[in-house]
């Protein structure tokens, strides 16, 4: 039972020290990897990007050439009239 004469030899101490250093290094690496992987995912509290307003969508279509200036003005007038008829203020001019 006492193979090492009631104590640990020099190689036993070296092996135990190296294994403890390896164990601590693995634990630290595991914690670092865990924290980095948690940081990679977006927060559940993050807000999705706001949808563009109707005026912005209309301006984008005009800028891409999908509608001409006359149609743009007509639709913009309709948007303003619809917004005021609902009891809400119309969009502010920039």
Image (cartoon, rainbow, N blue to C red):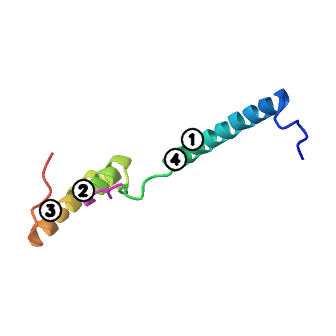
Residue at the limit of the structure toward the top, as seen here: 10
- Horizontal side of 24 relative to 68 (left or right) equals right
Mark 2–mark 3 contact, CB under 8 Å? no
Q: Main secondary structure of the magenta part?
A: loop
To which residue does mark 3 refer?
A: 80
Mark toward the start of the polypeptide (1 vs 2): 1
To which residue does mark 1 refer?
A: 32
To which residue does mark 2 refer?
A: 55
Q: Nearer the viewer, mark 1 or mark 2?
A: 1
Rendered residue at 29%/56% (across/down) = 58
Query: Does 91 sit above or below residue 40?
Result: below
Rendered residue at 52%/47% (across/down) = 40
Where residue 88 sits, quadrant-wise, is bottom left
Rendered residue at 12%/52% (across/down) = 92
Mark toward the start of the polypeptide (1 vs 3): 1
- Horizontal side of 61 relative to 6 (left or right) equals left
What mark, if any, has residue 40 been given in the picture? 4
Q: Which residues are magenta?
A: 48-55
Instruction: Work out whether residue 93 or residue 43 is closer to the camera in this orientation and state it.
Output: 43
Mark toward the start of the polypeptide (3 vs 4): 4
Mark 3–mark 4 contact, CB under 8 Å? no
Q: Nearer the viewer, mark 3 or mark 4?
A: 4
């Amino acid at each position: 039972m006492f193979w090492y004469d009631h104590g640990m030899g020099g190689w036993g101490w070296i092996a135990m020290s190296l294994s403890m250093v390896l164990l601590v290094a693995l634990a630290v690496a595991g914690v670092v990897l865990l924290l980095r992987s948690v940081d990679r995912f977006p927060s559940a509290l993050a807000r999705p990007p706001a949808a563009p307003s109707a005026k912005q969508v209309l301006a984008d279509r005009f800028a891409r050439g999908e509608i001409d200036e006359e149609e743009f003005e007509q639709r913009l007038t309709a948007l303003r009239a619809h917004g005021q008829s609902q009891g809400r203020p119309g969009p502010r001019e920039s």
